[in-house]
Amino acid sequence: MPMKDINTIESKIPEQVEMLSEKLVALKTAIGQQIFGQRTVVDHTLVTLLAGGHALLVGVPGLAKTKLVETLGIVLGMDDKRIQFTPDLMPADILGSEILETAEDGKRHFHFLKGPIFTQLLMADEINRASPRTQSALLQAMQERFVTIAGVRHELPAPFHVLATQNPIEQEGTYPLPEAQLDRFLMQIDVPYPDKETERRILIETTGNQASQPTQILTPEELVEAQKLVRNLPVSDQVIEAILHLVREARPGESQNELVQQYVSWGPGPRASQALILAARALALLDGRLSPSIDDIIALSRPVLKHRMALSYSARAENITVDQIISSLLEPLE
């Protein structure tokens, strides 16, 4: 791109950030009226969408994960669908299939019937309950943004995002996602139990006859423009070096960190660096700032790295967690 065009884009960034900032504040407020006490979860989910990625929501049932996706569909004006993953779910149940139709003149032809993946916001509920074959069909579409049926390519809508859920407790009858497929998710977002005051509010406000309804704040087209703006936000050399240091230190082959050397089987690849820089830019935009900081890297390191690191058997035997290892990696940055 010519230098003149780059300078023109950069000169418009402050104005674009200011214009979008008001809507993003309204967006968080609207979601907060439906999802109580999960501010970090909401922020990280919005960061994922602004960065153009997919998220894996990990939490026990009943923590409003489904309601979060429904609310996002409304406030962002996106077409949303939900798929309940089960062991008998087939790839065609997600992607769609060709059916043989007979025309009025008696001629037969194949017609492609689109599956639920042809939506803008897809909730893949309990993704680890489906067979590896079905998981792979979804995860390939997440990466490629198109599906191929009978040799014909079908583009997915834009924007296209998958918010998958996973129950961390009940593992009987599940098929854990392989590490290479987990890497397709920009972030793993842990959904905790609410605190006492939040649960009190949930009891009072969700068990009556009156329930507030969210309103649309952004359009899908505005979300796509926001995603373009995220990629144009400048990043300082200091932040880039912090990302490179953090990700490379998480790899046992080249790390100087003793915990990583001893307890990590394999670490994050370059996709983790890409995810971290995009997420940091998105968080800066969500907060109305013009560029990300080291604090953004620290805040996003766990959801970006957690599912991209595998612990050794000795780590499990000694109750060493990924969170502990990431905390040790962050000490030089804090």
Image (cartoon, grey):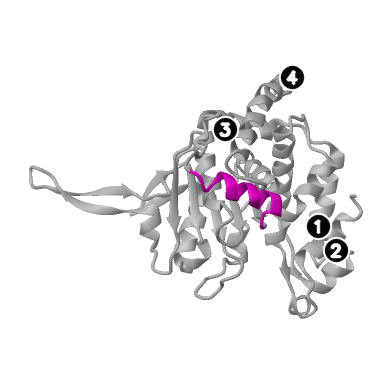
Marks 4, 3: nearer the viewer: 3
Q: Which residue carries the number 2 mark? A: 255
Q: Along the polypeptide, which appears first: circle 4 or circle 3? A: 4
In three-dimensional space, the C-alpha distance between marks 2 and 1, rounded to whole angstroms, equals: 7 Å
- Identify which amino acid the numbered label 2 is placed on: Ser
- Check residue 248 in the rendering and tell me which mark sits there, or answer none: 1
Q: Which residue carries the number 4 mark? A: 11
Q: Along the polypeptide, which appears first: circle 3 or circle 2? A: 3
Quadrant, the N terminus? top right
- Identify which amino acid the numbered label 4 is placed on: Ser
Could one spot residue 321 in this view of the protein? yes
Q: Which residues are magenta?
A: 193-208
- Identify which amino acid the numbered label 3 is placed on: Leu
The residue at 49%/74% (across/down) is 173
Q: Residues within 10 Å of mark 2 (few under 14, many from 20)?
A: some
Marks 3, 1: nearer the viewer: 3
Give SS at disc 2. Answer: loop
In three-dimensional space, the C-alpha distance between marks 3 and 1, rounded to whole angstroms, equals: 32 Å
Give SS at disc 1. Answer: helix
- Check residue 223 in the rendering and tell me which mark sits there, or answer none: 3
Give coordinates of residue 324: x percent, y percent. 82, 64
The residue at 82%/64% (across/down) is 325
Give SS at disc 4. Answer: helix
Q: Is residue 197 magenta?
A: yes
Q: Along the polypeptide, which appears first: circle 4 or circle 1? A: 4
Q: Are marks 4 and 1 in contact (CB under 8 Å)?
A: no
Q: Are marks 2 and 1 in contact (CB under 8 Å)?
A: yes
